[in-house]
Amino acid sequence: MATFSADVYQNEFLPDGGTDVHAIVTVACSGAGEAGQSGSGDAAEIVLVDTSGSMSGENIAAVQLAAAAALDQVLDGVWFAVVAGSHQALLAYPQDGSAMARMDERTRAEAKRAVAGFRADGGTAMGTWLALATRLFAAVPSVTQRHAILLTDGVNQHETPDELSAAIEAARGRFQCDCRGVGSDWQVAEVRRIATALLGSVELIAKPAEMAADFEQIMRQAMGRGVADAALRVWAPQGAQVLFVRQVSPTVEDLTARRQEVNALTGAYPTGAWGDESRDYHVAVRLPAKAVGQEQLASRVQVAIGEAVVAQSLVKAMWSNDDTLTTRIDPAVAHYTGQAELAEAIQDGLAAKAVGDTDTATVKLGRAVQLAAETGNDDATTRLRKIVEIEDAGTGTVRLKRSVSKLDEMALDTASTKTTRVKK
Amino acid sequence: MTPSEGEGAGAAGAAVEHPVAEVLLCPSCTSPVAAGERFCEACGADLGPPTANAAASPTTPPTATRPGAPELDATPGTCRECGGDVAQDGYCTQCGARAPSPRNHFTEQPAPWVAAVCDRGVRHTRNEDAAAVSADPEPGGHAVLVVCDGVSSSTDSDVASLAAARAARDVLAAGRPEGTGTVATRVAASTKALVAAANAANEAVIAHTAVGPGNPASCTFVAAVVHGRDLVVGWVGDSRAYWLPDAAAPRLLTTDDSFAAEQIAEGVPRATAESGPQAHAITRWLGIDAPDHTPRTVSLDLDVPGWVLVCSDGLWNYCSEAQDVATLLATTSRTGGADPLELAGGLVDWANAQGGQDNVTVALARVDPGHGDAATAPHTQPTSATGSTPAAHREEVQPDGHILS
């Protein structure tokens, strides 16, 4: 039986007239069990792989290995399907006319044979892959936990951005999707759009040979998520405004726009499936100021599975005229505020660089170097060093490097949202 | 009440007026819980094994209420700010206002001549002070004023201090000196009762000490027992008792068990010692880690009208000298009248207006030997064992009270 906890880190003291309350809420899950084993419904997995013409050669061979490795990780009894994607989506397995098959010794072997028959041909229209996955998941009513892996190597050329958007919207809330791009010919922003909407990750696979290990890891993680779906609920008092709700660890994801109304004062933010893990959330609420000495609740932050609230923590506000209390910024809030700004600075800097705006790129990436140093994100610093020459990390003084590998840029971009944990 | 006749009736009356059934607070949510309950009905917290007091006085009707007992009811269901529902977490479900915890401010007035006000103050988030008082209905009878100040660096001091104050009060209310003995024997009996009360208070603190790491719960203790013209005071720590006669010199009756008091004894001026960095370090307290919790005691003949005042340092921080307290009391009574509850509330408000740096507790008993002097035989001879002071005896006695025999 999974158990959740929610712990708050904040400075509840506000100065006279202060209105904005910031808190980091650490949500931890333990005893999650395995996907599809909780008794509340079955789990399902779909592997969506790019088999367009550009995949020929080394890539298609790697995809065959990777898909097989992923299938090996799928637990017996879990529903699954394999989709070969190009300018259209083809159901590669099962081939008996049903939408999905239950994993067992026989179906695993059959699916691997189907994967081995992949041939690289055609264009790229990822919206069609998502649309087929949405239909396949919907065809098995007993399934309550739905997850997909999507792999591409190129730009979404054979449908319009609007068509892709429509497919993403149709899939939103229906399944989670972890996305991977192999090589340097795909667009990080385009694939990130899919991953963000479908509560998944986006990462670069620089070399085809790394694909199998990555797929295996994704699938093992998916199978370790025994809680099919949990939501973060944020209550704020009448007259207050939820400024934002943001996941800040392990990656930065702005959840604000995902709000679904529970009641007039409470919004639910879907967080997808959970294994034994912990995630941090930054909640910011604006309150009408009260008199010095008064105390009030700024937010109830809860974890809900369905309608059941399984954990709650309280974010408080207390007005004080004691500067020693009100000027202190909670270390967790400071750390993750910096990490969120770091992600933004990297993405903005790379976007500016891509359109030739060297000045903006230098300023943004300089700020990123400064924030990475301040928040102790050494991985980000290492990746930034491949793009800029750092003259002074403390002031954020950098120069753009003349020649930069496209893969290094993409690695920096895809990893920009990864955060380091605050040192407690 | 006349103690010389019908002692049994008197004792029974005392039992009805001052049932010793413990009113405890849940250490998690501070909702009241019945003695002996293992879990809090409000929040489900484990309350640990029943305390010794839970088993006391099985004949006490379970529904008996103590006159003047604070209404430490569970969190109110309706928000005072907006009328919304208050959730289990203690905050309004609509506007988020914190429902005031009854523990943060409560009053007791068991009789018109005795009252106590216990308040969180301004700066502290929790009220770790506690007060418990009892009194005969008529002025001049038997009254007990107990104040305990929870040590804020320790865990659950708010729960422990209230349990301690009530345990001590119950011992002193039940253990009144009876009979027509001499002043000295009555004082000796009260002194013995004070030692027993401190023991009971100490047991109560220990019973509310959470197991495991962390600072164990601890608190100060001061109790004043008024019995007709007799006053006996016992204390551990730096909570105080003052005698404030209407028309004579006011006196601080207690000597703090504190670092500041040690400095004063060595000649440092009171104002300097009590504002130093260690001013609030106490040298004795109640609790499982207390090296010695035997109260020091003092007795006095209340031969003129005046007030017995018992308080925590939340008050005396702002008016330490007896004359300052007397002036404050006189000023407050001129504007707010002479009802002890009004007066105690006025003193608490005053301390909060000075900054309310600490929890504030004030307990008062009005003494008027000219009226209703029912509890004790007239003082026909000097009552002081030493005769050092004509109008009053003030003698620190050994804990067993033998000096006053």
Image (cartoon, rainbow, N blue to C red):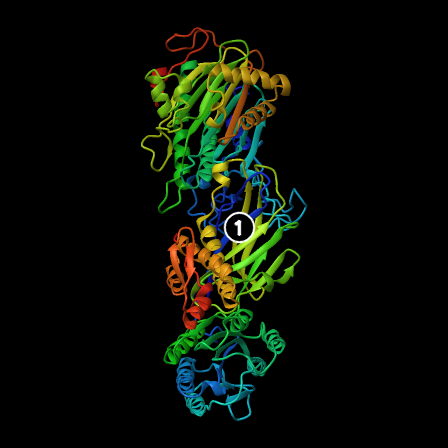
Q: Determine crowd level at label 1: few under 14, some 14-19, many 20+ residues with C-alpha closer than 10 A.
A: many
Is A420 displayed left or right of A16 in the figure? left
According to the picture, the residue beneath numbered tag 1 turns out to be: A22
Residue closest to the eye, A46 or B301: A46
Q: Is residue A24 visible?
A: yes
The x and y percentages for residue A382 are 37, 62
Q: Residue furthest front?
A: A402
Q: Name which quarter of the figure residue B399 lies in.
A: top left
Q: Dot 1 lies on which element?
A: strand
Is A408 displayed left or right of B319 in the figure? left
Q: Amino acid at mark 1?
A: His
| Depicted A117 relative to depicted A153: above or below | below
The residue that appears at 52% across and 15% down in the rendered structure is B326
| Depicted B364 relative to depicted A382: above or below | above
Is A392 displayed left or right of B126 in the figure? left
Q: Badge 1 sits on which subunit?
A: A
The x and y percentages for residue A87 are 56, 86
Q: How many marks?
A: 1
Q: Residue furthest right?
A: B83
Q: Name which quarter of the figure residue A210 lies in.
A: bottom left
| Depicted B178 relative to depicted A168: above or below | above
Q: Is residue A29 visible?
A: no
Residue closest to the eye, B239 or A403: A403
| Depicted B4 relative to depicted A378: above or below | above
The x and y percentages for residue A183 are 43, 78
The x and y percentages for residue A319 are 56, 40
Residue closest to the eye, A323 or B234: A323
